[in-house]
Amino acid sequence: MKKTLLLATAIASAAALSGCAVASAPVTGFLYSDVTYPVNATSNDQGPKTGEASASSILGIFATGDASIAAAAKNGGITKVKTVDVNATSFFGIYAKYTVVVTGE
């Protein structure tokens, strides 16, 4: 029984440490990250409309979503993009989410 528990613990630990869901960011935390940073800006003021688009990953194995600037602009009804920011969130390599936020008119 003791050997079975030890083996199960070793397998679970290996599985937990082998999968890595990471959203790129200028700084990251080992256990948790939630970072927002700029990608692009124009000389215009921030626009009155906001649009978001996201992509996410589970264990670095499954990834889905459209986090493009075009998708974010479309979701916000924006035709003239003024600023682009990104929010990258990850939790212990298990779950990661990358969100593009655009403002404009």
Image (tube, rainbow, N blue to C red):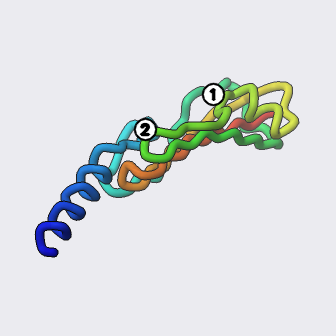
Residue 41 in view in this figure: yes
In the picture as drawn, the residue positioned furthest to the front comes out as 1
- Seen as rendered, the residue at the extreme bottom is 1
Q: Earlier in the sequence, mark 2 or mark 1?
A: 2
Where is residue 63? Give x, y as percent.
55, 37
| Drawn side of residue 36 relative to residue 8, left or right | right
Q: Please tell me the numbered disc located at residue 75.
A: none
Q: Position of residue 58 (x, y in %)?
A: 49, 46
Residue at 35% over, 44% down: 19
User: In this view of the protein, can residue 36 be seen by the observer?
Assistant: no
Label 2 sits on a secondary structure element that is loop
Q: The C terminus is located in which quarter? A: top right
- Amino acid type, mark 1: Ala
Residue linked to disc 1: 41
> How would you rate the neighbour count of disc 2 (Cα within 10 Å): few for under 14, some for 14-19, many for 20 or more?
some
Labels in figure, total: 2
Describe residue 90's horizontal placement relative to residue 67 as left or right.
left
* Location of residue 4 in the rendering, given as x and y in whole percent from the top left corner: 18, 67
Query: Is residue 45 positioned above or below 95 on the image?
Result: above
Toward the viewer: 3 or 98? Answer: 3
Task: Give the residue at x 63% y 28%.
Answer: 41
Q: Which mark is residue 25?
A: 2
Q: Nearer the viewer, residue 15 or 40?
A: 15
User: Disc 2 versus disc 1: distance between alpha carbons?
Assistant: 18 Å
State the residue lying farthest toward the left.
3
Observer-nearest of 31 and 11: 11
Badge nearest the viewer, 2 or 1 = 2
Residue 54: % across, % down: 64, 41
